[in-house]
Amino acid sequence: MLSRLMSGSDRTLDREFNCTVRLLDDSEYSCTVQRDAKGQWVFEQVCHHLNLLEKDYFGIRFVDPDKQRHWLDFSKPITKQMRSQPPYTMCLRVKFYPPDPAALKEEITRYLVFLQIKRDLYHGRLLCKSSDAATLAAFILQAEIGDYDPGKHPEGYSSKFQFFPKHSERLERRIAEIHKSELTGQSPEISEMNFLRKAQSLETYGVDPHPCKDVSGNAAFLAFTPFGFVVLQGNRRIHFLKWNEVTKLKFEGKTFHIYATHQEDQKIILTYFAPTPEACKHLWKCGVENQAFYQFEKSSQVRTVSSSNLFFKGSRFRYSGKVAKEVMEQSAKIRREPPEIHRAGMVPSRSCPSITHGPRQSSVPRTRRRAVHISIMEGLESLRDSGHSTPVRSVSNGNSFLRSHGAEGGTAEFSEDSYSPSDSVLPTPVSNDPSDQAQVRHTNGPRRIQEEGGTEQCTQNQARPQAVKPKGKRSHLEKTLPSQHGPEEGVNVVICSLARLFLVTLALLFALLLLLIVLTESELDLAFLRDIRRTPEFQQFHYEYFCPLRRWLACKLRWMGGNLINK
């Protein structure tokens, strides 16, 4: 009897597993999930827990044992998407940034987007000048601690709060000045609203950079924003394509292609190399989903896309959610009492520390007010769980900026006027080698984007990330379709393409032969077969070609059979 009860409980456990979702305020929501449950079920449970109705902007992200990030597919069972054993840990993140976050219908939605952008600011994905950084940080300060109170906030109080991993005393003083003099009387709701308006005006709002490399092995960062596709490379933004200019996204192995029509119908192809085929496929799916969400007016207009033009090779994918216009129309119909918001500003955070997370490790010692040297990798172990990918280093638009010293970038000079919030550990695949760094200059002024390795709390298992390696030589701006691979790789590609063409041709001929046999030899009296048999063309083919060929084949078979019998 006891063994039966134990076997029954084991079967029940086999049908269920535990799942933990880390929310944007770093609290956790845990639930028991049926083994055949789809991703939609977990997402609905999280949204119900948060009392969230405008949920189409959000998604659930997880990291596989190879440190590759994925968005949970709501239409598929969870267990079929995981490559490890339960229990599973995931993260709720903003998947599609609202084009105008301040125009969101409900305050709870604006608050969650505020938490995401605050996380982006801390981890360096939101590039801005030091003046904009001070304003954003002051809004966060006002939202979380309220008005300045001399009794509670002594001189230098802003240095105890952590908005970015590293910043200067000058920036701290500017944050405190704005908080004291310009934001008095603003409620948390108003401060968050102003924060969203300011963040939305920045060019890197909504950027989720994916690390890639170009033909020369230089790091490039590809990102999809509410307004289009962005490429950052060589200390500058080298490409920005609006969504209506992008005609096709395609990948083959590690190679990612962007086809676009730009400036007076000029057709261009951008080609970059992802670190792994899995990372390239993730990049492609993110691009397809973002383009569908922001470009189309109705979800019924979304079509299934293929990752390749070569017959049956490649992946097929269709975005199945609502598009931005439908989400806004649905939000306008919401009629309910605003839900209560439990702001978590005073709760310590694992990955994006709250401003009350304790004393900050100052990047500028008190004894040196001008330039100082800091280690790029300093303090990485203390940071966890970024919801996005590659860290983006930003500095001020003034004369002083972060400069790399040495070919391998061992140290960096950090000036008072600079703003550099990117020393954080972010999801992979990125390199653990500090020498694998890239600098990107934005058109607004000096900027830096840097890859840094580490671990993430929302991983299923711990594994070392792989460094980005280029697959071959290609130019990142091509005017024609042919690839510029190396000689050996080009020969392999041609041989593979010819082999696929040969196999597909044989398959088509075999299918055509089967169809001819069905048409000529079978007695199936189907309507479409009957119509084909009655056409003059088919009758001519049947009597002038097929019947003589059949008699010839029969004669040859009888001759071969006779020879075999005589032997």
Image (tube, rainbow, N blue to C red):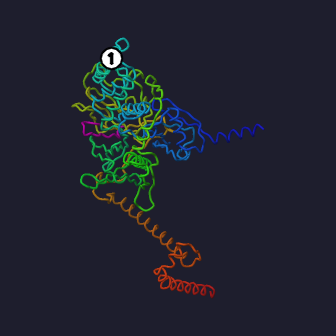
As rendered, which of 240 and 430 lies closer to the eye? Answer: 240
As rendered, which of 458 and 532 lies closer to the eye? Answer: 532
Drawn side of residue 391 relative to residue 72, left or right = left
Whole-percent x, y for residue 326 in the image? 42, 44
Using the rendered view, name the quadrant where residue 424 is placed. top left
Q: Quadrant of the C terminus?
A: bottom right
Outermost residue toward the right? 1
Residue 435 among magenta residues: yes
Say which amino acid is labelled 1: Gly
Whole-percent x, y for residue 123 in the image? 38, 33
Magenta stretch? 433-447
State the residue at coordinates (76%, 37%): 2
Outermost residue toward the top? 151
Outermost residue toward the left? 399
Q: Residues within 10 Å of mark 1 (few under 14, many from 20)?
A: few
At mark 1, the secondary structure is: loop
Using the rendered view, name the quadrant where residue 156 is placed. top left
- Total tally of numbered discs in the picture: 1
Q: Quadrant of the N terminus?
A: top right
Q: How would you classify the magenta stretch by its main secondary structure? A: loop
Drawn side of residue 384 relative to residue 131, left or right = right
Residue 66 among magenta residues: no
Whole-percent x, y for residue 164 in the image? 35, 28
Drawn side of residue 95 relative to residue 412, left or right = right
State the residue at coordinates (30%, 49%): 216
As rendered, which of 139 and 133 lies closer to the eye? Answer: 139
Q: Is residue 132 above or below residue 563?
A: above
Residue marked by disc 1: 156
State the residue at coordinates (42%, 42%): 429
Whole-percent x, y for residue 39 in the image? 53, 43
